[in-house]
Amino acid sequence: MKSELQKTLDLEEVAFSHIPVLSQEVITGLAIRPGGNYLDLTVGGGGHSRLILEVAEDVKITAVDQDTDALTAAQQNLAEFGERVNFIHSNFANYAFPANTYDGILADLGVSSYHLDQPERGFSFRNAANLDMRMNQQQSLTAADVINDWDEKELADIFFKYGEERLSRRIARRIVEKRPFQTTTELADAIAYSVPPKYRHGRIHPATRVFQALRIVVNDELKVLETLIEKAPLALVPGGRMVIISFHSLEDRLVKHGLRNSPMLKVLTKKPIIAGEEEISQNVRSRSAKLRIAERVLEV
Ligand SMILES: C[S@@+](CC[C@H](N)C(=O)[O-])C[C@H]1O[C@@H](n2cnc3c(N)ncnc32)[C@H](O)[C@@H]1O
């Protein structure tokens, strides 16, 4: 059986859609109300924020993203809403969550279509590009630093842990023998030649899992998610909702346990909400999306 992570990884192979995932479920989950104050921690191209702004009158949004390109795109997309949207460039883990402020908080995790559509950002091996993978261009650590400087054991460990790559040791050994690497395609080719032919010609490119692992490490994705779940509930008003959409099993596990263990939250989704056949047929990214909802309790 294919793991959730693997399903996500397959998306490398396809053109990305700009349609916000599980949009109706996000609106219902946040219980948007007129005059409400919402926090979109991953505004991306502004798809979900636009829906929130349209669904009820006088709604206000604080829109956060760590990627300046995404913020520029969102500013253009949401220009007509003027001062109802306040844009903030920040990693959501560093956002100064103001206490008792928001009626709803949304996080739609991971990279956006903008990242994958721009070869120069180095997230994909479909085109030759520098090994970058930073969502925040101001950060110094890049995928090239990890691949060229980390020792063999560290590489094998991250490929196994964050990529669920069972040939992690073999691939790490090959990388260390052949490095330095400069581009995404050089690295992907080296990985392809380090695995048995059967694996090389499988359904997904043999570099897919390693690229996923690198992306998680470069952007410290699991750590920042933990911080978000720890800090964000305080920023909700009592009865306010938190909606998180994750795209692979490592993230979803953190979300599930984090929401359940927060003394400030009551979980409203026993099982994660997933996309239906129709949405999946229109938006392939929704295929691996899992949405969980929690509500701030009245008294802690
Ligand atoms: C999947 S996209 C969001 C798409 C958006 N919901 C829409 O409908 O257009 C995820 C966005 O979150 C941003 N992001 C990911 N991790 C982040 C973090 N730790 N802090 C701030 N932004 C982050 C990415 O830069 C990306 O633009």
Image: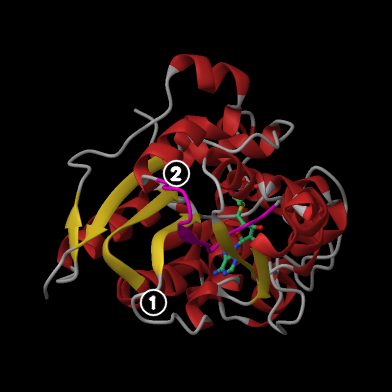
Work out whether residue 122 can be spotted.
Answer: no
Query: Of label 2 and label 1, which has the lower sequence position?
Result: 2
Residue 141 covered by magenta stretch: no
Circle nearer the viewer, 2 or 1: 1
Residue 98's quadrant in the figure?
bottom left
Q: Position of residue 32 (x, y in %)?
A: 42, 46
Work out whether residue 133 can be spotted.
Answer: yes
Q: Is mark 2 within 8 Å of ligand 1?
A: no
Measure how far apart labels 2 and 1 are at the Cα level: 22 Å
Residue 93 image label: none
Q: Residue at x 57, y 30 (%)?
A: 198
Residue 227 image label: 1
Q: Position of residue 200 (x, y in %)?
A: 63, 35
Query: Which secondary structure class fits the magenta region best?
Result: loop
Q: Position of residue 21 (x, y in %)?
A: 54, 36
Residue projecting furthest to the left: 299
Q: Which residues make up the magenta segment? A: 32-44
List the residue tagged with mark 2: 5
Q: Residue at x 54, y 54 (%)?
A: 59
**Amino acid type, label 2:** Leu
37 or 187, nearer to the observer: 37
The C terminus sits in image quarter? bottom left
Q: Position of residue 220 (x, y in %)?
A: 52, 73
